[in-house]
Each structure stands twice: as C-alpha cells, then as structure tokens.
Image (spheres, rainbow, N blue to C red):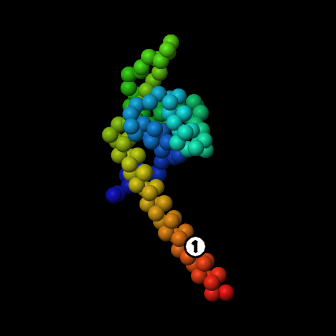
Amino acid sequence: MAVRHKPLTESYFYILLCLYHGPKHGYGIMQQILELSGGQVQIGAGTLYGATTDLLQKDWIREVPPVSGGYEQRRQYALTDEGRKTLLEEMDRLERMERMASLVRDHIAGGEEGEKGNG
C-alpha cells in the first residue's frame, strides 16, 4: 500500500483514533486520549482546537450537528472517508514499524545470548 501522507503527529493520530467508531465532542476526545494512552498523552483544549481546525481543513474530519449537553451544546466531530483512509494507512505504517522493531530486537537478543554462551 502506497503511503499518501507524512506520518501523523501523535495528537492527530489519537484524535482520528478516537473518532474511529463514531462522533465525539472535544472534551470526550481529550478524555479518551488520556485513557487510550494510559495517561501518557494529555491534549489540552488549545492543542485540540488547533488540531481540529487543521483536520477540518484537510477534510479528515467534519463537524456534525451538536447534541444538547445540559445547558450547552457541544461541537462534535466525525471522521470523513479521507480521514478514515489516512488513519488506516498510519495504523498499517505503525504495525510495520512494530514488526520490524520486534525482528531486530529478537535478533539482537538472540545474538547476545549466543555471544554469552560462547564466552
């Protein structure tokens, strides 16, 4: 599969990943990123706003009609077809990298054990 885009930033990847199964509002995205990353990645409101603005311009996400949330209405975002393709390409790229890293790690570990055994 030919890669059509540069690798995604961590923020973009997590935002698109959060929208994979359906629309979410900004606060929901921030909370899910924190959960998915095991607390390692925390995206603030300013970062989310800048990222969603850019993702909207790239046509990777779209704004969907807001749902009532108490006294306020929250903007919700959903993946576009282009955004889904981009996310799937990035997931494939990351999986390939993980496989290669595992092969190298296993080879190195095997080589180290062999060297220790030959000493």
Question: Is residue 23 shown above or below 3?
Answer: above
Question: Is residue 96 shown above or below 77?
Answer: below
| Amino acid type indicated by mark 1 | Ala
Residue 116 percent location from the top left of the image: 65, 81
Residue 8 percent location from the top left of the image: 48, 48
Q: As drawn, which residue projects farthest toward the bottom?
A: 118
Residue 50 percent location from the top left of the image: 53, 33
Q: Residues within 10 Å of mark 1 (few under 14, many from 20)?
A: few
Q: Specify whether 61 is left or right of 10.
A: left
Residue with the mark numbered 1: 109
Q: As drawn, which residue projects farthest toward the front?
A: 117
Q: As drawn, which residue projects farthest toward the right?
A: 119
User: How many numbered tags mark residues here?
Assistant: 1
The quadrant in which the C terminus is found is bottom right
Residue 73 percent location from the top left of the image: 46, 17
Q: Specify whether 69 is left or right of 40.
A: left
For the point 52% across and 42% down, the residue is: 36
